[in-house]
Amino acid sequence: MAIPRAEIETKVSEVLESALGADAEDIVPTAILTEDLGAESIDFLDIQFQLEKKFSTPEKPFKIEQGELFPENMMSNPDFVKEGKFTDAGMKVLREKMPHVDLAVFEGDRNVKGIAKLFTVKSLCDFIEIKLKK
Amino acid sequence: MRWMWIDTIVAYEPDRRLVAIKNVSLAEEHLHEHFAADGALPAQPVMPASLMIEGMAQTAGILAGSVRRFREKVVLAKIQKAEITADVVPGQCIRYDARIERVDPMGAGTSGTIERLDHRTGAWEKIGETEIMFSHVDQNMSGLAFPEHNFVFSDSFRNVLRASGLGHLMD
C-alpha cells in the first residue's frame, strides 16, 4: 500500500532528527544533509539503517542495498571518476541508479567534492517514494 | 597491548548476539581515582560510565567482527545512544548483552543492554542501554590506506575469545 507523501516526510524527518541530532525546523526539503544538517560519512549508514527500520512492515521488509541510496565504490573506479570529476560513464550510472537526486546543477561541474550536496531532505523523500512504488 | 574491558564471553549466538562479563575489582587502579577522597568527602570508587561504554563497544565489536569471520577491520564509528542509570561498584559484576540490528558491507548497527549483578542479592538489574554503529574501515577509507593485517582484532581479543571457548571463530 502506498504511503502518503506527508507521512514519508514525517518519518524521514524523524530519522534525521535521530541520526543527526538536527532540529525539526531545520529539516526542510532543500536542506543539504552534509552542509545544512551536519551529516558526516558514517551518518549516511546510520540514516540508511534507520530508514530501513522506519519503513519496514512485518509483511514487507524495506531493505536498501549498498549503493542504492548513496553512491558507493564509484569514486575509486577510474571508469567513473577521472581527475576528480565524474566521466560520462559515471554520470550515466548516477542517472540510472539515482533517480532520486537532481543532477541538473551537477552536470556542468561534475566535481566529486560536490556530490554530497546532491543529497537533500527532498532527495531522501523521493528515494523512499520511488522505492515504495516498485 | 589493548586494554580489555571485558573478562569473558558467556553467550554467543552466531550473527545475532554476544554476551560478555566484566568483574569490577578494587584492585583496578583507575577506581581509586574515580573518585578519590576529597577533603571531607570519602573515596567513592565507581566504574566510570565511559569505560562501560567501551566494554559494550568491545562486546558488540567482537559480535560485529564475527559476522564476517573477523576479515573486516571493525571500528567504532558512532554511539547513537548510551544511557547508564546506576553506578557499578567494586565487587559487582557487569553484563554486556549485545545484539546485531543490521549488517551491511559498509558497517554494522548494534543494540545492547547493560546489567549489574550484586552478589548480596544474586539479582541482575538492568542499568543501561546502548546503540552503537561500527564501520568496516577498509570499505570506508576515503582515500586512506590502512595496514593490511587486522590491527583491530589483536591478540588481546583473540585471547578473550580463546579463553571463552570461541577461539575457533578466529581460525
Image (tube, coloured by chain):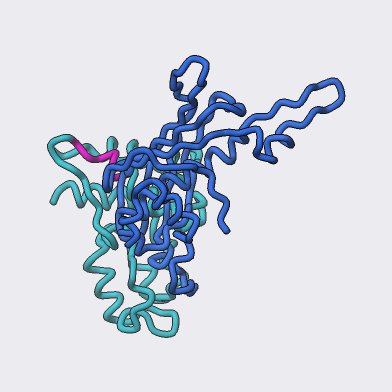
Identify the residue at the far right of this view: B39
Give percent across and percent down for residue A50: 34, 43
Q: Residue at x 30, y 83 (%)?
A: A79
Q: Position of residue A25 (x, y in %)?
A: 48, 38
| Left or right: where B147 falls relative to A73 | right
Residue at point 47%, 53% (across, down):
B77
Q: Is residue B98 left or right of residue A127?
A: right
Between B50 and A89, the residue placed more toward the observer is B50
Q: Which residues are magenta?
A: A51-57
| A77 or B28: nearer the viewer | B28
For the point 77% across and 31% down, the residue is B36
Is B154 positioned to the left or the right of A106 in the image? right
Please determine whether, in this image, residue A33 is positioned above or below residue B10.
below
Give the quadrant of residue B141.
bottom left
In the shown orientation, is residue A4 left or right of residue B138? Answer: left
- The chain letter of the cyan chain reads A
Look at 71% across and 26% down and name the residue there.
B44
Up/down of B74 relative to B147, above or below: above
**How many numbered circles does the render carry?**
0
Q: Is residue A52 magenta?
A: yes
Q: Is the N terminus of chain B in the top left, top right, bottom left or bottom right quadrant?
A: bottom right
Q: Residue A44: image x %, image y %?
A: 40, 54
Q: Say which quadrant the C terminus of chain B sits in.
A: bottom left
Q: In the image, is residue B123 part of the stretch drawn in magenta?
A: no
